[in-house]
Image (cartoon, rainbow, N blue to C red):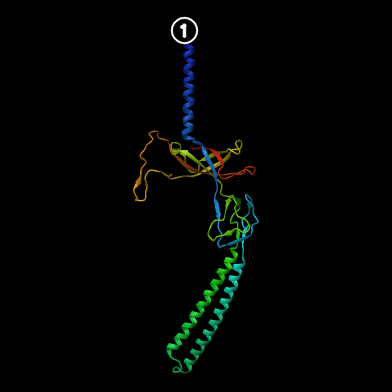
Amino acid sequence: MQQGFVRMIRYLVTLGAVALAGYVLAMMFQEYLFHPWTRDAHVRAQVIKITPRVSGPIVELPVSDNQAVRKGDLLFKIDPRTFTLAIEQAEAKLKQARASAMVSLDQATRARDLHKRDKGAISEQALVRKENNLLVSNADVDVALANLHAAQLDLEFTEVRAPVDGYITNLKLRQGTQTVANQPALALIDTASFWVQGFFKETQIRHVRSGNQATIKLMTYPDQPLDGVVENMGWGISQQDGQSDADLLPTINPTFDWIRLAQRIPVRIRLTAIPEEVALRVGTTASVFIKTE
């Protein structure tokens, strides 16, 4: 009798343990389903490619690699001598065009006065030709003035300044380096644009919405969680199958893996507050936990 009672107690304890384990597993699954998390997240930021508008050798380089800069700070200066000479040439051509316009104006004025006094003294065709010469001369003045403004802009473009507050990164320039117009010269990380991009399984994002609160733990600062908000989710990811080849035919992989793996969808997390002691760096790893409603 006593042994049967002990056996029953064991059964009840075992049944209770199984029930408790099932409850814990159910709660964990619910937590996983309604409060998704991922360790596949990284810090991102806008990287501005600093591109000179004019070509020439660098004569000043006051910044160094990984230096913090403020908006408007000089990053580098291109040799201005060629562009100063271009301004002098443009100014000379403008003076020449204005002088030619004055001559055309004087000739047109004389022709009008002469035509008024004696219509037979000058033909209508000659009068129209004088008026047209004046219009052409005035247009030449406008062109010369525009060329002068362009030359002045080119001179201003020899000083390349930071468009935003940020950090210089991977600086390869040196004094004397030849820069090429419209070719990126250095990278500037915008300090006001940091966000976290987490990659969640497609089975996790069903209940994720823009505005959900998120907790971010950086691997660099594991004991200092950051607060964030879901901004948006990606609407597509690249796929290998179905891409067109040179003949515009779809490329299909002849092999197929029967083990179906959930795809990962990018979710953008906006950081709501960044402590002063936390230094964000692009590419560093983070974990993200999203609180869904």
Q: Is residue 246 above or below residue 115?
A: above
**Which image quadrant is residue 156 in?**
bottom right
Q: How many labels does the image show?
A: 1
Mark 1 falls on what kind of element? helix
Q: List the single residue furthest toward the top.
A: 1
Q: Mark 1 points at which residue?
A: 4
| Residue 188 vs residue 218, the one in the foreground | 188
Tell me where residue 131 appears, x and y as whole percent: 47, 84
> Which residue: 47% across, 30% down?
29
Query: Left or right: 175 with respect to 131?
Result: right
**Which image quadrant is residue 100 in?**
bottom right
Mark 1 is surrounded, within 10 Å at the Cα level, by few (under 14), some (14 to 19) or many (20 or more) other residues, namely few
Tell me where residue 284 appears, x and y as whole percent: 56, 42
Tell me where residue 179 appears, x and y as whole percent: 57, 59
Tell me where residue 90 appears, x and y as whole percent: 57, 73
> Which residue: 48% across, 33% down?
32
> Which residue: 47% across, 10% down?
7
> Which residue: 59% across, 74% down?
91
What amino acid is at disc 1?
Gly
Q: Is residue 72 above or below residue 222?
A: below
**Which image quadrant is residue 180 in?**
bottom right
